[in-house]
Structure formats: structure tokens, C-alpha cells
Amino acid sequence: MNAENTAPKVLIHSLSRDELAGLFTEMQEPKYRADQLWSWLYVKKVMDWSAMSNMPSSLKEKLAARFNLNSVKMEKTEGESGRTRKILVGLQDGEQVEEVLIPGGDRKTVCVSSQAGCRFRCTFCASGQAGFRRNLDAGEMVGQVILAANVYGERPSNVVFMGIGEPLDNYDAVLKAVRIINDQDGLGIGARKITISTCGIVPGIERLGEEGIQVELSVSLHAADDELRSKLMPVNRTYPLTCLIEACRKYFDRTGRLITFEYTMIGGLNDAAAHARNLVKLISGMPARVNLIPLSPVEEFDGKASSPDRAEVFMEILGRAGINSTLRMSKGSSLKAACGQLRYRKK
Ligand code: SF4
């Protein structure tokens, strides 16, 4: 077999709408065929070329020869229908990532991965400890959303880029995926229902602020002083708190969007009243809210979740300073679904 035959095909879900239109022009096909295909991909969400009944067989054969329609496949699930479910997702080259489906009230959220592994090595995160493998293509992230839609039986209402990987370290592909899932003639998931989460990549935050897209930004803080944050999150040595908070302020000035700060509460490490007061000092006056999340234990990190009492005291200190916060128990912990653990355990 020659190299041409063994090279992986391009994922059809990696093509933006403009790229798809350009492809049909190049193939000398009418523009409405590109619209038909877009609708099969993102409205009907089919995973089989033969199901595209209003498209000529010859065209489908040409497309099938060049493009892969199955961007991702479900390899394993944990959890039950109607509750938090974790899916181990297989990629074309044998890499694996995970996504988590989190239904709640009228929300159907999907948490998607943006990289296989992660290079940022936050101490309490299984993905970080497992190391970096590669960036995901846009189509592999879009594919996770379609897979979630097919499992839910309807389009997810919210998409959060909070699975394995650092989204702003795979900036172009993540933004491309965001634009594809946001397209109103396709999946149509509103930009405000899409959250990009970062460990604090300052150039990425600055760039995102310039995009003119109204996505939610969530920044993982986990400590409000540089010494502790650098221990927990080595990225802090490159982008320390003053420069991170400055980037967040600018992001708000440009977009008018509130920032959510994520703060994982680790018993005896970052959950004392003094830590809460540091956090108040750091972000007071900022249009922001704080999500307090008791740690989901991982084998590689010797830490435990904060007790409910300490978490309550922490939250009260924020509240007295006028900072809006919520305390949320990790829905994943009961099925060992903290970021990275399903993939990690299978190896
Ligand atoms: S918490 Fe996020 S940024 Fe940190 S190591 Fe894990 S996946 Fe990477």
C-alpha cells in the first residue's frame, strides 16, 4: 500500500462553512449542495454518507474518498442515562480523550476535550500528570458535540471546553470548532452557551478578547498568591497573577462579559480564611464570579476536598466582600470522572 492510501482522511467536521463552500466550488458542484451537506452534518447529524438521501451517489462517493465522517467514536461509557455520564472517545489515530455529559434542569451540558493530554501539569489533575500527546482537530471537538447530541437525543444546550487539555494552547482549532457549533444553520449553540476554560494563558485571553465572539471565559485560579499558585499550577511561573488579572480586566473591558474564576478547594492547602481574603484582594472590583469546587481526588496528588464547613466560611468571606460565588460539588467525582481519569485508568 502506498502512503497516499494510508494517510488519514481529513475530518469533514473540521471544515468551516466557508471551506465547505470553497470545496464544492472546486468540485464544480452547485452551492446549494454545500448547504445540503451542512444540514446533514449539523441538523440531522448523520454519521453515514448513504443516509444523505437528497445527494447524488457519485458526489457522496467523491466525498467519502476524501473525508472521514466519523470524527470520533464512543469506546466506553460510565454513568446512567439522565445523570452525569462520562464517555471515553476514540480518535482516528488511536488516541483517546473523554467527554462528560452533565444534564441538569433544562440544561444539557457537554464538557469536551481539546487536546489528547496536556502540557501544563497542574499538580491535582490526572490529565496533566499523564503528559501531552497532541492537539485535537476542530472536527474532533465538533464530533464530541455531535456524539453528545446523539446520546442525549437532542442538541446539547451548553458546551464547555473543560475536558482534557488547555483550549487556549490549541487556539485556532478551538475557535474554529466554536464557530462551527455556533453556526445558526447547523447546531446553532449560542456563543453565550459556550464556555472556554483556561489555566491562565495570557496571550490567548488577549486574543480571545479581540475575536468579537461572545463566549464565556472561565479562568482556573485555585490560589490567590503567586507562591501557592505556582506550586499548584506551574503555568503561573510564566503568567503570574498580576499579568493574568490584568488580562482578565482587559477582556472584560473589550467584551463586557463577566469572567468566572474557578477555585478548586483543597483541604488545608488553599481553603483557609486567609486564602479567601487574598482572593478578595485580588479580584475585588472586578466584574466576576467565583466557582468553588471541592477537589476530586486523584491518585497522583496527595490532597483531599475541603470540608463543607471550611468551604462555607470561605464563601461567606467572598460574599461579605460583595463577590458572587457558588459552591458546587463536582458531579463527576462519584464516578471518578474528574478531568483525565477515565483515559488515565484505561492505560
Ligand atoms: S487542569 Fe487543565 S490545564 Fe491543568 S493540567 Fe489539567 S487539563 Fe491541563
Image: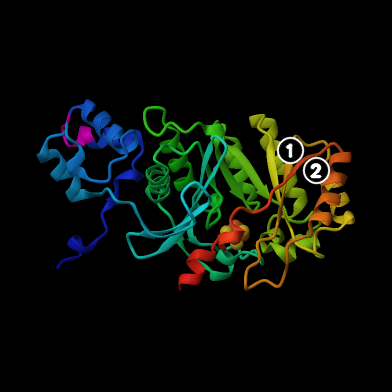
127 sits left or right of 308 in the view: left
Quarter occupied by the N terminus:
bottom left
Give the Cα separation between the discs numbered 1 and 2: 8 Å
- The image quadrant that residue 304 belongs to is bottom right
Q: Which residue is depicted at the point 78% across and 37% down?
A: 286
Question: Tags 1 and 2 in contact by the CB under 8 Å rule?
Answer: yes
115 sits left or right of 67 in the view: right
Label 2: which residue? Answer: 283
Q: Amino acid at mark 2?
A: Ile
- Density class for disc 2 (Cα within 10 Å; few <14, some 14-19, many ≥20) is some
- Front residue of 337 and 249: 337
Is residue 201 in the magenta section? no
225 sits left or right of 44 in the view: right
Q: Which residue is depicted at the point 77% across and 49% down?
A: 242
Rendered location of residue 215, percent (x, y)? 56, 36
Q: Which residue is depicted at the point 85% across and 55% down?
A: 275
Q: Amino acid at mark 1?
A: Ala
Label 1: which residue? Answer: 288
- The image quadrant that residue 20 belongs to is top left
Furthest toward the left, the residue is: 58
- Front residue of 221 and 163: 163
Report if residue 137 is visible in the image: yes
Tell me the magenta residue range.
24-29
Q: Secondary structure at mark 1?
A: strand
Report if residue 338 is visible in the image: no
